[in-house]
Image (cartoon, rainbow, N blue to C red):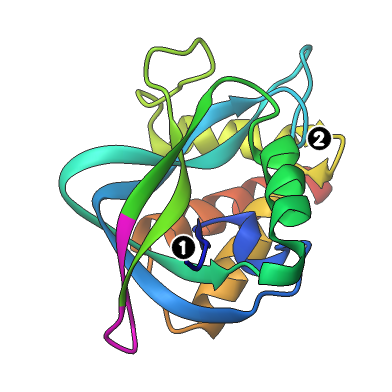
């Protein structure tokens, strides 16, 4: 049986493994959202950043990329993914149904935010998110680069995300104003 994982953020542009297959996919009942405080990869304890998470929302859909894990190194890839994605208990690993753009339906691992976790920030508006993202820096680099890379790759895949595009523009304006 094949193992799939759903990428909706940095996994899209940096999966850190070579997939056996990949395909644009849709997940129903969740939305892509900068709703998780990042104290490791894109922020710090002193100045947390924000990272994307899947946030449950009735009637929502999230388009991303489904990656089929290679069978010959499946366990190693899963271990590496879990070390990366489950760095804190703010994410829960769940198996969710995806519809692939070629018509196939698969079950995939997905990383969903735990709304009861202290790192959940679902109440922040876009302006507040932009302020945090524009200045935060973590172990894997600037928070704004994470946002911009994700927006760019979604666009290249033909995946529209108006909220992410708007947030990207807000952050670009803040960064440009600070540099002026």
Q: Is residue 110 left or right of residue 41?
A: left
Whether residue 180 sits left or right of residue 70 in the image: it is right
Circle 2 residues within 10 Å: few <14, some 14–19, many ≥20: many
According to the picture, the residue beneath numbered tag 1 turns out to be: 165
Disc 1 or 2, which lies upstream in sequence? 2
Residue 139, image quadrant: top right
**Dot 1 crowding, Cα within 10 Å, few <14, some 14–19, many 20+:** some
Residue 74 percent coordinates (x, y)? 69, 60
Q: Is residue 6 one of those drawn in magenta? A: no
In the depicted structure, whether residue 3 falls above or below residue 176? below
Image location of residue 31, percent across then percent down: 32, 49
Residue 55 vs residue 137, the one in the foreground:
55
Image coordinates for residue 57, horizontal then vertical, percent: 21, 40
Residue 106 falls in which quadrant of the image?
bottom left
Visible residue check, residue 177: no
Is 100 a magenta residue?
Answer: yes
| Cα separation between marks 1 and 2 | 21 Å
- Range of magenta residues: 97-104
Helix or strand or loop: what does disc 1 sit on? helix
- Looking at the picture, does residue 86 appear above or below residue 145? above
Label 2 belongs to which residue? 137
Task: Tell me if residue 70 comes above or below residue 158 in the rendering.
Answer: above
Residue placed most toward the observer, 58 or 147: 58
Q: Nearer the viewer, residue 180 or 21?
A: 21
Residue 99 visible here: yes
Q: Is residue 63 left or right of residue 18?
A: left
Residue drawn at x 69%, y 22% as measured from the top left: 48
Please give the name of the residue rendered at 65% of the width and 39% of the height, measured from the top-left corner: 85
How far from the left and from the top, in percent, is residue 151?
56, 65
Which residue does the image show at 56% across and 71% down from the upper left? 68
Residue at 71% across, 52% down = 75
């Amino acid at each position: 049986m094949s193992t799939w994982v759903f990428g909706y953020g940095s996994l899209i542009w940096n999966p850190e493994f070579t997939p056996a297959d990949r395909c644009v996919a849709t997940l129903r009942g969740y939305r892509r959202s900068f709703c998780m405080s990042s104290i490791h990869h894109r922020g710090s304890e002193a100045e947390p950043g924000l990272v994307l998470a899947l946030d449950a929302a009735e009637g929502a859909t999230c388009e991303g990329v489904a990656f089929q894990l290679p069978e010959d190194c499946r366990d190693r890839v899963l271990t590496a993914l879990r070390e990366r994605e489950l760095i804190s208990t703010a994410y829960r690993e769940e198996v969710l149904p995806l519809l692939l753009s070629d018509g196939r339906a698969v079950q995939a691992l997905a990383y969903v935010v735990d709304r009861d976790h202290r790192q959940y920030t679902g109440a922040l508006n876009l302006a507040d998110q932009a302020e945090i993202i524009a200045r935060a820096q973590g172990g894997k680099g600037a928070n704004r680069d994470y946002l911009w890379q994700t927006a760019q790759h979604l666009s290249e895949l033909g995946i529209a995300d108006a909220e992410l595009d708007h947030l990207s523009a807000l952050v670009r304006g803040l960064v440009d104003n600070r540099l002026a």
